[in-house]
Image: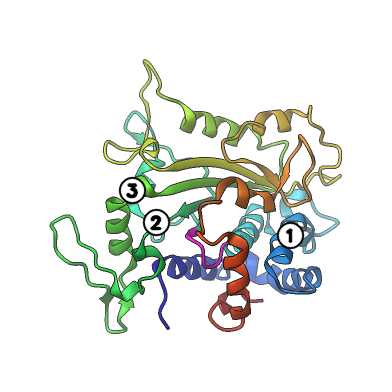
Amino acid sequence: MPQNICEYLREEAVGGLFKLNTVNKAWPIWQEVIKDKISHWNAVNVIDLGDYLSEIFRSTGSSDRSQSSVSGGGTGWEALVCWYLNLCLLESRTVVVKFKNSLIPQPIRDAITVKYGTFPSNTESDLIAITFPDKADYISTDKFNIIARDNQGSLIDTKIGRNNKFNYLPIINSLTDRDFNDFEIGIIQCKTNWNDNAQIPMLWDMIYSSKGFEGHRTTVGSSIYSIKDIRRFTYSFVTVPTSSEGGSKITPNSTCVKRVQNLSGGNYWGKPTANSVAYSLKEIFGRNFSSASSHGLRISLNSALPQLKNTYSYFNI
């Protein structure tokens, strides 16, 4: 069946989540809670899962263990967030990927690399959201029919090996180099605990937002690829949180809130929005990914949901 390069990447990204031991152990329980929350599968109800992600995550927690052990800790939370975001973004031009060199285009990896002198020190970027340009190569062209050239001008084969596997990385690197200025990149840091980790996204967002470090050897990006050249860059934070009271004691004046209140991509948790504290994760679509679909995310998602048992069965719902 024809598949564009965005949906190929989404399938690879989501499929990789189910290769994690933490996810394999938790998924049978998470799956039942998810199904219980959705009485009718339409875009509104699926997106509203963002209000319940903390509850879903906690459903596999152990009452007699510390918060760091809940559902395998950060790995489980990161995977659940990635699963949810990609489900809601089906048939759009935004794909959320757990950071992995074999999936992230080289130009994007270069653009978000921070160097201290000659030492590369990448952000703790759990997830990378890539919004691809509104062009035929990403939307309407079957991945095997893409015409891409390497740096020497030679055509890149779309199929490799005896099994005619899609030659993803060379092709996506070529397309990203060609259309770099039309890409949008979002770094999404996922942490189960808020109080202990809020300073990390605050500092990284400051680094990415900086216009330079006078008298300092810290640089962002490479001489060829810079986040300043792309269409849009955002840095977001998503937490459970796993404090004993589940975040109920966090107020607009809490230190952890103050530290992330001005992040370029926003501050979210897996609960309903609490004014001046945190947005529900479902709010990230309108804030950061509004350009992902020319039809609107609700229409795109409603079109995709009937295919969850076949084309998009890799979501395991």
Q: Position of residue 82 (x, y in %)?
A: 59, 59
Q: Give the Cα separation between the discs numbered 2 and 3.
A: 18 Å
**Within 10 Å of the Cα at label 1, are there few (<14), some (14-19), or many (20+) other Cα atoms?**
some
The residue that label 1 is drawn on is 48
Would residue 104 appear left or right of 82 to someone viewing this image? left
Most foreground residue, 97 or 305: 305
Looking at the image, do the residues carrying marks 1 and 2 touch, with CB atoms under 8 Å apart?
no
Q: Looking at numbered disc 1 in the image, what kind of residue is underneath it?
A: Asp
The residue that label 3 is drawn on is 180
Precedes in sequence: disc 3 or disc 1: 1
Q: Which residue is drawn at 49% across and 70% down?
A: 11
Magenta residues span 87-94
Q: Which residue is drawn at 31% across and 38% down?
A: 222
Q: Which residue is drawn at 52% across and 43% down?
A: 124
Disc 3 element = helix
Residue ranking furthest to the top: 215
Total numbered labels placed on residues in the image: 3
- Could you say which quadrant of the image residue 237 lies in? top right
Q: Give the Cα separation between the discs numbered 1 and 2.
A: 31 Å
